[in-house]
Structures are given as structure tokens and as C-alpha cells.
Image (tube, helix red, strand yellow):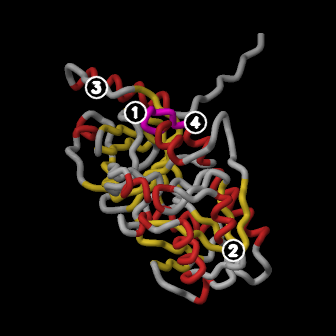
Amino acid sequence: MKVIVNKQDSITKGSTCAIGSFDGLHRGHQRIIRYLRRLAHPGNKIGIITFRPLPFLVLHHAAICCLTPKEEKERILQALGVDFIYYFNFTSKFAQLSPNDFVQLIAKNIAPAAIAVGKNFHFGRRRQGSVHLFKKFARNLFDVRILPILKDEGIISSTRIRELLLLGHVKAANRLLGREYAISGTVIKGKGKGKRLGFPTINIKVLKDKLLPLDGVYKVVVVVDNKEFLGALFCQHNVVEVHLIDFTGNLYKREVTIKLLERIRDIRKFSDDNSLKIAIAADIRKVQPRIKKSGVGP
């Protein structure tokens, strides 16, 4: 997959694209990409037009909290079969482009054959442009396809998924994502307290712009060299620490991916190490697969 930033490239000419923030690459985004594949003429490329940083971070001076930081987004898009991703550098000046100027810029820099947008797509200065205005300004430049919004007990959106994760509702967030929410990072040295208590852990250094879920203990799957291990994740502020079940080895300085399955409990303070040890043992029992006991006949 080719990555293009704010410049012309021959791969985009005559392509079939979608435009938006695409943070999270949830089920709604995945459906759009499947639609692009059906819409594109044989031999034509499909691409994603997006922004860096994300518009809401610039417009609302929000803390950086992406579901899918840049590298993760590109990795998922490549796996979904996208041929290129085109980034516009989103600055305060760029945000002042009129709706018509924005459409003209797309035509000049990208020259697509068609662009698919969601029904709630807005663009241009102060989000003045609607999908119908987008279609009007794009006339004779490129085709515009307007897609309905995907719903699952409400609109599936990146904002809703962020809110669910910040409330600790991992299962609901995963359902909207269409996959487990994943946290990747490098294993770093910790304080070694888990090991002293009999439950060795790995500490993960996570990218600063990656959204972490509500503080708590979570049941997770940890991916190491394409192998999966169940684990108990302790997450508090920027501390991400995992005990892996049935794993032996040294992962220091290695890259791992943690897939969140469900939240087990809140963070609690313990009066002594023995109380903490008992709590950790209980957490691990909840993570381990339950073995069904076979009945014994008379």
C-alpha cells in the first residue's frame, strides 16, 4: 500500500476512494471499503483520503486519543486490500478552505473517478458542506456515491467507540469495531513486583496518542510471534501491565499486541501484599478457560 502526503501521484488518477477520518476502522468503515471494491472498475486502484492530524484534534484542541494511530491505521488498511492512503495535512489554515475549494483540491491533487462518503459527511470551513453540496461541487469532476449510515443499537461511529472504551464497555466496543480493540507496544522493564508475588508480568510502552480504556483489570489475549496467550491486563493511567498464562520466556524489548476481551474489575488499593496476591489469583481464575466436569453415572 502506498502512502501519499499532500502531493500528486499517478496511482490516484482514476481511482475509487472514500474520504473521512477513518479512526478505528470500525464495521462502518469496513463496509465502505468493501463497497469501493465493488464500485471500482477492473484495474483501477482503491484508496482512502484522510487527514493528519485528525480534524477533531485541531478544531477542538482535544487531547490526542486515537483508536488507530497512523501506523496501526495503515497496517489495517493494507490488510483490507486498500491500494493507497492519501493524507491532507490538517492545519488551522486548511480548516478554513471553503467547501468548493476543498472539492477542487481533491480533483487537482487526486483526480479520482469516484468517491464514496457516508450520509453524515461534512466538510469545508465550519463543516458547512453537506453530502449534497459535495455532490454538486463534484459534478463533471468525479462521481459521488452517498452511503447510508451503519447502525447497531445506534450509529456506529468512532466517537461512540471511544466513549464505550472510556466507560470500560469493551465487549460493546468490540462489537462495533468488528474485532477486538488492540493495544500494541514494546515490552519494557517494570518494578518486578508481580514476579515477587508469584505472578510475573510484562510492562508495555504504548504510543502516547493511543486511547487506553478505563482503568481496570481486563481479560486479554496477547499475541507473541503470531501465537496467542490468555492474560490478565492491569491498566491504570499510562501503566499497561500483563500477566500471561502458560507462557515462559523473556519478551524484553519485543513488540506485542494485546487484544481486549472483557473488563474484570475496577482498580483497588490493597492493605498488604498478601491481599493483592489473593486478588491477582482471583483475576487469573476469571481469565483461565473453564473446564467442564463430565458427569459420573451411577
| Numbered label attached to residue 217 | 1
Label 2, label 3: how far apart the Cα atoms are: 55 Å
Residues at circles 2 and 1 in contact by the CB criterion of under 8 Å: no
Q: What secondary structure is marked by label 1?
A: strand
Q: Can residue 126 be found in the magenta stretch? A: no
Residue drawn at point x = 36 percent, y = 29 percent: 280
Q: Quickly name the residue at label 2.
A: 16
Asked if residue 149 lies left or right of residue 89, the reply is: right
Label 1 to label 4: alpha-carbon separation: 17 Å
Q: Quadrant of residue 114?
A: bottom right
Q: Nearer the viewer, residue 203 or 24?
A: 24
Q: Reading the chain from its start, which is encountered first: label 4 or label 3?
A: 4
Q: Amino acid at mark 3?
A: Leu
Q: Residues within 10 Å of mark 2 (few under 14, many from 20)?
A: many
> Is mark 2 in CB contact (under 8 Å) with mark 3?
no
Residue stretch rendered in magenta on the structure: 165-172
Q: Is residue 254 visible?
A: yes
Horizontal arrangement in the rendering, residue 268 relative to residue 284 (left or right): left
Q: Check disc 4 and report its element: helix, strand or loop.
A: helix
**Viewer can see residue 249:** no
The residue under label 3 is 276
Q: Is residue 285 left or right of residue 208?
A: right
Name the amino acid, label 2: Thr
